[in-house]
Image (cartoon, helix red, strand yellow):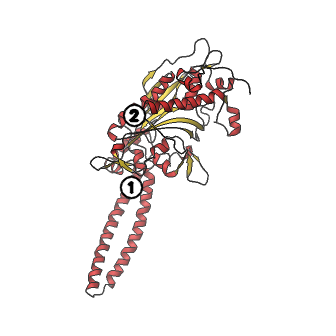
């Protein structure tokens, strides 16, 4: 949520950010609501002052034994007017608050202009994005099905489309990848591991920025105020919601490996095969809560933490800075990490790292007290470190052999009982 003072004092800044995002939000509607709110507040203040003066006058009249009937009648009128005006103000405030929840974060000045992902800017690349020598690369889902590791047909029977059943060494690799990521983030990058709930309430999802805008992307538990989490970012950024803590706690780094659940609304026809776009997937998340002055440096470090995983696994990737039209609702600035998929001949997103500045902290009323006693909203950052299923898919494709087997990256072998290669599985 933006600071209302920015909307009042620097509306052109907000309008320009909305323009760069190609957002359809009409700031004029919010400004009109805010004007009505402030005018109503002025009238309320005047009526309350009038009521206080009348109360003092009544006390004087009663003390001197004089008749206060006329003023008491006025007091009743004042009370009725106040009650009506307070109801009006509550309605206006509710409308204003709801509108504020629909306004995206202000873009950082360093975000390049653009309409969509085609305007993203490559920052750097690592590894050699190449095709295998002597044979045509097969997609990960074909490799997995041929080896008896991935079963999409039975997953559809169990749950529906866009689910996957992982078996044997594929399931073990999924677990190995998740554990490698958590071990690196906790042992090398300084994050504290959290095991959060996989269900979140409306307040948590609103503070994070998923509600109300992205309600259609969530799995809602019927007849409740609860939802399955779309990412561990949701609970991690809410740990200190509605709290005031000491600045000495900052910076705070959290990581969690959890299942994530997304409806993929609007994704019809996109990545229908394989593990790229599914309803349920595992992901290791990184979240930082930091002082405002250091947040953009912390973003660069977070991107490096995600890159370290891909380097350890030997997967070619590139880092891109998202354009204004592709930057997410909560974010002021975002980098995507894209890993190489040889069967597609292109890079695919495997991590997104964002600085949300004080946007989420304001929505969640999370503040810290600095050494001078001043209350300040911290900045929050989040990043995938990484999406586990997509990492497994990228390993299948980049480590495939001509005979259809898959080499296991050296970094994963200790987590997989020393297995070096996944060959043909026994039929089931």
Q: Quadrant of residue 62?
A: bottom left
State the residue at coordinates (43%, 44%): 104
- Camera sees residue 257: yes
**Disc 1 and disc 2 in contact, CB within 8 angstroms:** no
Q: Which residue is mark 2?
A: 299
Is residue 2 or residue 198 the one in the foreground? 198
- Camera sees residue 120: no
Which residue appears farthest toward the top when viewing the image? 134
Which residue appears farthest toward the right when viewing the image? 428
**Residue 103, x across and y down, in percent:** 43, 47
Q: Residues within 10 Å of mark 1 (few under 14, many from 20)?
A: few
Q: Is residue 71 left or right of residue 273?
A: left
Helix, strand or loop at label 1? It is helix
State the residue at coordinates (54%, 20%): 410
Q: Which residue is mark 1?
A: 32
Residue 325 vs 411, above or below: the answer is below
Is residue 300 or residue 341 the one in the foreground? 300
Q: How many marks?
A: 2
Is residue 95 or residue 155 the one in the foreground? 155
**Residue 406, x across and y down, in percent:** 61, 20
Q: Which mark is residue 277?
A: none
Residue 181 vs 239, above or below: the answer is above
**Residue 316, x across and y down, in percent:** 50, 21
| Cα distance between the residues tagged 1 and 2 | 36 Å
Helix, strand or loop at label 2? It is helix
Q: Residues within 10 Å of mark 2 (few under 14, many from 20)?
A: many
**First in residue order: circle 1 vs circle 2:** 1
**Residue 150, x across and y down, in percent:** 66, 29
Q: Is residue 156 left or right of residue 309?
A: right
Residue 265 vs 135, above or below: the answer is below
Closer to the observer: label 1 or label 2?
A: 2
State the residue at coordinates (44%, 58%): 94
């Amino acid at each position: 949520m933006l600071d209302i003072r920015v909307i009042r004092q620097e509306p052109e800044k907000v309008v320009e950010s909305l323009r760069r995002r190609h957002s359809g939000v009409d700031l004029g509607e919010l400004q009109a609501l805010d004007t009505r709110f402030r005018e109503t507040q002025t009238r309320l203040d005047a009526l309350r002052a009038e009521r206080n003066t009348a109360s003092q006058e009544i006390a004087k009249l009663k003390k001197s034994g004089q008749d206060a009937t006329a003023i008491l009648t006025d007091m009743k009128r004042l009370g009725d007017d106040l009650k009506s005006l307070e109801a009006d103000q509550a309605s206006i405030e509710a409308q204003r608050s709801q509108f504020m929840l629909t306004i995206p974060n202000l873009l950082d000045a360093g975000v390049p202009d653009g309409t969509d992902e085609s305007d993203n800017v490559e920052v750097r690349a690592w590894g050699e994005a190449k095709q295998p020598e002597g044979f045509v690369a097969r997609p990960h889902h074909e490799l997995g099905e041929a080896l008896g590791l991935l079963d999409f047909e039975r997953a559809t029977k169990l749950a529906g489309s866009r689910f996957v059943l992982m078996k044997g060494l594929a399931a073990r690799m999924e677990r190995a990848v998740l554990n490698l990521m958590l071990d690196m983030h906790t042992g090398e990058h300084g994050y504290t591991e959290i095991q959060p709930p996989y269900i979140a309430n409306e307040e948590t999802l609103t503070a994070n920025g998923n509600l109300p805008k992205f309600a259609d992307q969530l799995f809602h538990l019927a007849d409740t105020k609860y939802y399955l989490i779309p990412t561990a970012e949701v609970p991690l950024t809410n740990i200190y919601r509605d709290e005031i803590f000491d600045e000495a706690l900052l910076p705070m780094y959290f990581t969690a490996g959890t299942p994530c659940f997304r409806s993929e609304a609007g994704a019809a026809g996109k990545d229908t095969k394989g593990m790229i776009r599914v309803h349920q997937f595992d992901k290791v998340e990184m979240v930082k809560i930091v002082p405002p002055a250091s947040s953009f440096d912390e973003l660069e470090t977070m991107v490096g933490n995600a890159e370290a995983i891909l380097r350890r696994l030997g997967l070619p990737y590139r880092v891109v800075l998202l354009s204004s039209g592709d930057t997410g609702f909560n974010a002021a600035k975002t980098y995507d990490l894209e890993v190489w998929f040889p069967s597609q001949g292109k890079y695919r997103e495997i991590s997104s790292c964002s600085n949300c500045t004080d946007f989420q902290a304001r929505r969640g009323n999370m503040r810290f007290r600095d050494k001078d006693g001043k209350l300040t909203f911290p900045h929050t950052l989040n990043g995938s470190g990484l999406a586990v299923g997509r990492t497994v898919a990228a390993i299948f494709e980049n480590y495939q052999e001509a005979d259809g087997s898959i080499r296991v990256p050296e970094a994963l072998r200790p987590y997989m009982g020393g297995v070096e290669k996944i060959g043909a599985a026994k039929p089931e």
